[in-house]
Structures are given as structure tokens and as C-alpha cells.
Image: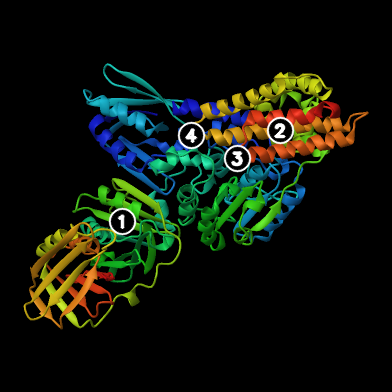
């Protein structure tokens, strides 16, 4: 059974040849975390296959060439632009004894090295990836049973701080002995971040810790100041095209549909997320209704349709994973829904004969909806509010 | 790979390995046992290997018929259940087909899906480790067991000072010393090295508690010898090995704890004024009884020593629970009267592992630590608690 699960997951992973292959929306990732082993396989890339992050890669390459790699890093930037992919690639190079300059003088690993093989299979004992889903594997029963909304301190201790306090398992001369990558570091609460400080400040020699976060403001200043920060940016259109061509996604040739392009806004991860979440079905259902509402039509079904699609998405995510939190999945689904509506509105704004003020004010309404959701207003009510703001001026009075 | 194994012997090995296999892990390969079949001349050898990324264990058995050398990586739980359930069979045959493996008995056929053996982190061999080791030496299993039991209980469990979450091993030319502490107590156990054990240099390292408790289970034959190799990152125990090239019957390897152990020599008080000698069993029983009426709030048991009568009165009181008084006759008492509080578990933990029937406790003032000594090879320092 375990074998079967693993095969399935591996296949799924490799089919997503993307800079953010092992990431998706939180809900989608939660769906990838059955409490059975077999989800840790990593689509390990080399630096030359990571698109559009030349500045970040430059910083990391320089650190490796100097031979003195800082022990704590924060990779920050928007969602879905390759932070984790880069962290995995960087970490894999650090602990690989086969790393050596290639013909062009760049440090490169031996692609067939056993270390890379073990990392890709998730079996390397000195390469640790810590995510909130590891709660399902905690030795504490109550942590296992908890809804996975943040990274519990127990998970941090068990999967990051404990391994950091042990010597490396594999021998060999490499830039670092062990690498620990914390995904979605902003999901650590204040206590967790404080617990991490000591390890971040002074880990054992040869330990490298990489925190990935799309929300750097949530990290305490004390955490940030102990780390070397590397910024990741949204991909420019050219890099986006280059990524798309190599992604193997259905629209690799035809180019992204306009709504998806607007929604992704330079984040390959967002494209994958939208594809996996089946947002093209949302588009075909919602767009006619949105157009109708925008031109003053009744569109009575629109708010309930939006709420229903959101709910279906969240339910599916919760069903697919044990302990996935419905609340977190709802938030994720609403984020996607508002993201979709915003991308549609942005296209409207750019359209001919557009009334910029009207669409700008509607985009403001989307932002307002986000804060309404954050203060726990029912999803249906928020959608109704949004649709009301969508109507042309006279109808609103 | 094709091997025919004695079922009972194999089951025993698989059971031990299952204790090492990571029970909860997102890494599927670490829930597996690797079977390595080798053949040199006419003798076949089957090695079972498992790891949880921190510790790894190889068990070697020659009670097998290797028909075709090879490897297989199979889920521990599944094969354990199969081998255990096939209890009518004397022998089982294992034959690998790609990543899968078939297990056959007289009337049964199982095909177990496994993983590519190359995806399993290499479990190091002793001979290889010994080449790069800082120190290699042998020590009798019986003495090793004594050192472990006398220190393992005092290691820190949940502590952010990771260096004390293990036992310090310190070896110089003549002695082997194990030290553990959790910040409020400290246990030191020593053993002399035999005349032929003195090769190799001085070495210190911190061994994780888990490796030592596994070693206790493995080294159950007191007449055996354990060969130890310590490298920069790992410690290896080859059980039943005579030389570096002899793999023995089992080899346990573990990562070490990073960091430096606190300077413990300064913590052990010297020249204490009050010296008390008492019977171990009498005291253990008294401490246990007094501990019955303590709780989180009352914390400790008060120990009042009376020099004139050579007695000790243990008293405990817990709000809403009650109180107790137990009197113990002492064998010998030197010094003034003293009254101080101790955590009863800290005292009984030490008395439980002491083998000598008579034990000495040395005290100075109610705020200063007490020292429990038994024989010449065990010292235990314990901080008093404030009773009021």
C-alpha cells in the first residue's frame, strides 16, 4: 500500500516540471499529505533550470564559490516563484561531495551522484524538509490529531531542532554537513520563532538552515536579523514564457489564457495551482455571470455560485487529507476565488472603453472582501457584497 | 537475490530491526528493512539493515542458504507480519524480482512490493569506519551495560540544551567514563579498561540516549565483547566482534550529539562535612513510601538526619492529600544534624541502578548538593529542593 501511494505521488510530482513542483496551494499540499510515508520526493533541479531568479541564484553561487556559506537564510518573495525549488537545489549542492567547478567555472554537482538520488527520493538522512504537514508524523498523538493550520512548536522541535543538534549521518567533504529547509516559515507562531532563535544563531558547524516564506513580515525581527536574506521576485513575461515552454502544461504551446495570465502575474506556482484546482471550470461558469452582473443584468445566481465553488474546493481539499483544516482550506479557496475575480477585473480595466474609476473601485472592493473574510464574515455574504459592488452605478443606488 | 532462511532466527532479527525502523516518518525508505545476501565460498551471509536517519543497525546471520546474492528493500511491518504469521514453517525463501520480493513457504506465496535498494541511505560497515576513526577499542558487554544503566536515566528529556540530551563518553588511557545530567542531577559511572584495551587515544563524544537504550537491548550477552569506533560524526558498536574486520553479529551506528558537554568535574563537591552510610534497599523502600504523599506543589521529601540516634526521618506533606513520616536506621553517621529536601524520584532513580548493598551520601548544607556514592565507580550529584 505504501508503495502504491509513493508511486502515485512520485508520478504526480515528476509530471509537474515546474519551479514550484513540490508546492501548491496550502490546500493542495495538504491533499498531498496522507499519513502514510511517500510524499517527500523532491523534483530536484540544478541552478541552470531555475528560471527568472538570476539575482538570487547569483547571491547563492557567490556564497558557494567563496566556500563560506552562511548558516541561516531567509528566502522571501511572492508565492510560487521558486523559493523552495531554489532552496532544495542549493541545499542539495551544499551537502553533495561531488560538487566541483564545471567547464564554465560554475560549481555544479554530478547529476548522477548518489546524494542527489537520495535527496530526490526524500531518503537522505542529512537533508530535512520541514512543513506543517509533518504534524501527521509527530511522536505526540495530540499533535498528530490537530488540524494543520500552522507549524506547531512540537513539529519544529522534532523535525528541525532535534536533527540540527545531531551530527551528520553521511560522510564526505562537502560545503555543509546537513541542510534543514523550513517551508512556509511564517506559519510558525511567536513561540515557535523564539524557540528557533538559538538554533538559528549558533547551529552546530556545517549546519545550514533555510527558511522559505512568502510573508516575511510575519517573521520576528530577531529571526530575520540572524539570517542572510535572499529576495525572490515575480517572473518577467519573458521568463514566464521560458518557464511555460518547459513546464509540460497543456497550454505550453498556445500560451496562457488571458485570465490565467492576469491571475498568475508572473508566478509559475499560481499557474500550476490554478491548473490543479481546475480554475478553468470556474472561468467557464463564472465569467458569463460576471459579465452579466457587470452590465447590470440580474445575475442572481452569481454570489451563491461563487460560494458553492469555493466550498466544493475546500471540501475536496479536506477530504483528500487527514487533519487538513476546513478553516484553512476555506481561506485558501476564497483567496483563489478573489484572485480569479481580481484577474477578471484587471482585464476589464485594461479593456477598451473601460471606466477606470469603476474598475479601480471594484478592485478595492475585492481587497475589502479579503478583510471581511479575515474577520470571519460568511463566505456567501462576502460574495453578495462583492457582486453588489460589481453592478453599474445606477443599479447600486 | 534468492535466500532460504531459518524462520525463527529471521523473525528474531526482524523484530530487533523493527525497533530501529522509523515508526513515523514521511520517508518511506526509512520504514523498510534492507536485506543483503552475500556468498563467499560456501558460506552464505544475510545482513538485515535498518535506519531512522539518526541511528542504523546491521544484523548479520549465517544461518541462511544464499542461492543468489543480491539486495532487497522491503517494508518492515509487512515482512514482520508475514514472517511472524508463517509459524508452521521451519524455513522461508526470499526471491527478489525488481523492487518486489516473493516470500514462499510450503503452502504460501507472498509478493511484497518494496523499493529500489539504492534509495536506502548506506548503512556503514564497521571495518570502513574503523579506518577513519579517532579511536577504536574493545570493552566487555557486561561493563558497558553497567555504564549505560548507571547514567542513561539521568539524561535530559526535553531540554533546549541539546548537548545534555545524551550521555558523554570519555575515554583516556586507563578509564572509560560515562556522564549524564539534566541540569539538576549528574551521574558519573566509570570502568577500568583491560590491559589489551588501551590502544587508541583519548576521546570524548556525546551519544544520543536512543542509541544507548537500543544497545542495552542488543548487548544482552554479558560474556561478549563490544568493539567501538568513534569518528568525527558517528559512533559504531560492533557486538561480538574480535577485530576491526570481524563484523560481529550486530553493528549499531549512531550520529552524535553536537555541542559541548558542560564542565561537570566542577559540579562534583569535595570535602563534604556530613557522611552517611545506609542500606540501599531500606532507603529505597523508605523513599518510595514517602513519595506516595507528594505532588507537584509539595515537590520534595524532607530528610532530617539525626546524628545522636543515627536515624533519618523522611517526611512528606501534600496539601489536600495528607502527610507521611518514615524512619530509617542508618549504618553510620558522621557530622552534625541536618535537614534538607530532595525530589524523591531523583534519589530512587539512583538507588535503583546501584548494585552495592551499602551506599554513602555526603552532604554539607541544606542548599548545597548531595553526593551519592556506591563502590568506586559511581558518583551521583543531586540538588536539594526547597521544601517551604
Q: Which residue is mark 2?
A: A338
Chain ID of residue with mark 4: A
Image depth: mark 2 or mark 1 in front: 2
Q: CA distance from mark 2 to mark 1?
A: 65 Å
Chain ID of residue with mark 2: A
Q: CA distance from mark 3 to mark 2?
A: 44 Å
Q: Is residue A285 above or below residue B224?
A: above
Q: CA distance from mark 3 to mark 1?
A: 35 Å
Q: Which residue is mark 3?
A: A112
Image depth: mark 4 or mark 1 in front: 4
Q: Which residue is mark 4?
A: A323
Image depth: mark 4 or mark 3 in front: 4
Q: Which residue is mark 1?
A: B227
| Residue in view at x 72 percent, y 34 percent | A339
| Residue in view at x 81 percent, y 22 percent | A291
Q: CA distance from mark 4 to mark 2?
A: 25 Å
Q: Measured from the top left, where is residue B333 in percent x and y?
A: 11, 78
Q: Nearer the viewer, residue A128 or B284?
A: B284
Q: Nearer the viewer, residue A3 or A219?
A: A219
Amino acid at each position: 500500500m505504501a508503495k502504491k501511494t509513493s508511486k502515485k505521488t512520485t508520478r504526480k510530482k515528476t509530471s509537474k516540471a515546474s519551479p514550484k513542483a513540490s508546492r501548491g496551494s496550502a490546500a493542495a499540499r495538504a491533499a498531498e499529505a496522507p499519513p502514510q510515508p511517500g510524499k517527500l520526493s523532491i523534483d530536484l533541479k540544478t541552478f541552470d533550470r531555475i528560471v527568472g531568479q538570476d539575482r538570487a541564484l547569483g547571491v547563492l553561487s557567490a556564497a558557494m564559490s567563496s566556500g563560506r556559506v552562511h548558516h541561516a537564510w531567509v528566502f522571501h518573495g511572492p508565492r510560487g516563484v521558486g523559493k523552495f525549488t531554489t532552496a532544495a537545489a542549493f541545499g542539495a549542492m551544499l551537502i553533495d561531495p561531488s560538487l566541483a567547478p564545471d567547464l564554465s567555472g560554475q560549481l555544479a554537482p554530478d547529476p548522477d551522484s548518489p546524494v542527489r538520488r537520495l535527496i530526490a527520493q526524500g531518503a537522505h538522512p542529512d537533508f530535512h524538509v520541514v512543513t506543517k504537514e509533518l504534524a501527521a508524523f509527530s511522536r505526540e498523538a495530540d499533535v498528530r490529531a490537530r488540524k494543520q493550520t500552522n507549524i506547531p512548536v512540537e513539529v519544529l522541535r522534532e523535525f528541525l531542532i532535534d536533527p540540527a543538534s545531531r551530527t551528520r549521518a553521511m560522510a564526505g567533504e562537502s560545503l555543509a554537513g546537513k541542510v534543514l529547509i523550513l517551508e512556509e516559515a511564517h506559519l510558525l507562531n511567536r513561540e515557535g520563532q523564539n524557540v528557533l532563535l538559538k538554533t538559528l544563531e549558533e547551529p552546530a558547524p556545517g549546519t545550514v538552515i533555510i527558511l522559505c516564506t512568502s510573508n516575511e513580515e510575519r517573521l520576528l525581527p530577531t529571526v530575520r536579523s540572524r539570517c542572510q536574506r535572499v529576495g525572490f521576485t515575480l517572473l518577467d513575461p519573458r521568463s514566464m514564457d521560458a518557464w511555460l515552454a518547459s513546464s509540460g502544461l497543456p497550454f505550453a504551446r498556445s500560451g496562457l489564457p488571458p485570465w490565467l495570465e492576469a491571475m498568475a502575474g508572473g508566478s509559475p506556482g499560481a499557474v500550476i495551482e490554478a491548473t490543479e484546482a481546475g480554475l478553468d471550470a470556474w472561468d467557464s461558469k463564472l465569467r458569463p455571470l460576471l459579465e452579466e452582473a457587470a452590465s447590470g443584468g440580474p445575475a442572481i445566481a452569481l454570489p451563491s455560485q461563487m460560494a458553492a465553488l469555493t466550498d466544493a474546493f475546500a471540501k475536496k481539499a479536506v477530504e483528500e487529507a487527514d487533519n487538513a483544516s476546513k478553516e484553512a482550506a476555506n481561506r485558501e479557496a476564497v483567496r483563489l476565488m478573489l484572485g480569479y475575480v481580481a484577474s477578471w477585473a484587471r482585464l476589464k480595466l485594461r479593456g477598451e472603453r473601460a471606466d477606470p474609476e469603476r474598475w479601480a473601485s471594484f478592485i478595492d472592493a475585492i481587497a475589502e472582501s479579503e478583510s471581511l473574510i479575515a474577520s470571519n464574515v460568511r463566505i456567501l455574504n462576502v460574495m453578495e457584497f462583492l457582486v453588489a459592488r460589481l453592478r453599474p452605478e445606477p443599479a447600486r443606488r | 537475490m534468492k535466500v532460504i532462511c531459518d524462520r525463527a532466527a529471521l523473525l528474531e532479527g526482524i523484530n530487533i530491526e523493527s525497533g530501529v525502523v522509523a515508526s513515523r516518518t514521511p520517508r518511506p525508505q526509512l520504514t523498510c528493512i534492507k536485506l543483503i545476501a552475500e556468498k563467499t565460498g560456501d558460506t552464505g551471509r544475510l545482513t538485515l539493515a535498518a535506519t531512522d536517519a539518526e541511528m542504523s543497525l546491521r544484523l548479520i546471520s549465517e544461518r541462511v542458504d544464499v542461492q543468489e546474492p543480491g539486495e532487497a528493500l522491503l517494508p518492515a511491518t509487512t515482512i514482520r507480519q508475514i514472517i511472524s504469521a508463517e509459524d508452521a514453517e521451519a524455513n522461508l525463501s526470499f526471491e527478489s524480482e525488481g523492487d518486489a520480493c516473493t516470500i514462499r513457504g510450503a503452502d504460501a506465496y507472498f509478493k511484497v512490493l518494496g523499493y529500489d535498494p539504492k534509495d536506502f541511505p548506506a548503512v556503514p560497515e564497521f571495518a570502513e569506519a574503523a579506518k577513519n576513526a579517532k579511536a577504536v577499542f574493545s570493552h566487555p558487554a557486561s561493563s558497558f551495560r553497567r555504564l549505560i544503566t548507571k547514567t542513561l536515566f539521568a539524561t535530559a528529556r526535553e531540554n533546549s540544551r541539546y548537548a545534555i540530551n545524551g550521555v558523554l563518553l570519555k575515554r583516556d588511557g586507563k578509564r572509560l567514563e560515562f556522564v549524564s545530567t539534566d541540569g539538576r542531577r549528574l551521574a558519573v559511572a566509570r570502568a577500568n579498561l583491560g590491559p589489551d584495551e588501551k590502544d587508541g587515544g583519548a576521546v570524548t563524544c556525546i551519544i544520543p540516549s536512543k542509541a544507548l537504550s537500543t544497545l542495552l537491548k542488543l548487548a544482552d550477552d554479558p560474556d561478549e565483547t563490544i568493539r567501538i569506533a568513534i569518528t568525527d560524526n558517528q559512533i559504531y558498536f560492533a557486538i561480538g566482534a574480535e577485530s576491526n574486520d570481524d563484523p560481529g553479529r550486530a553493528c549499531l551506528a549512531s550520529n552524535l550529539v553536537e555541542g559541548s558537554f558542560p564542565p561537570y568535574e566542577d559540579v562534583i563537591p569535595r570535602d563534604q562535612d556530613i557522611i552517611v552510610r545506609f542500606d540501599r534497599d531500606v532507603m529505597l523502600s523508605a523513599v518510595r513510601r514517602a513519595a506516595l504523599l507528594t505532588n507537584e506543589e509539595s515537590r520534595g521529601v524532607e530528610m532530617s538526619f539525626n546524628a545522636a540516634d543515627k536515624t533519618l526521618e523522611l517526611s512528606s506533606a501534600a496539601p489536600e492529600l495528607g502527610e507521611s513520616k518514615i524512619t530509617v536506621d542508618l549504618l553510620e553517621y558522621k557530622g552534625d544534624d541536618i535537614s534538607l529536601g530532595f525530589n524523591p524520584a531523583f534519589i530512587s532513580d539512583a538507588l535503583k541502578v546501584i548494585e552495592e548493598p551499602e551506599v554513602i551520601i555526603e552532604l554539607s548544607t541544606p542548599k548545597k548538593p548531595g553526593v551519592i556514592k556506591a563502590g568506586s565507580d559511581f558518583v551521583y550529584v543531586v540538588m536539594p529542593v526547597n521544601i517551604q
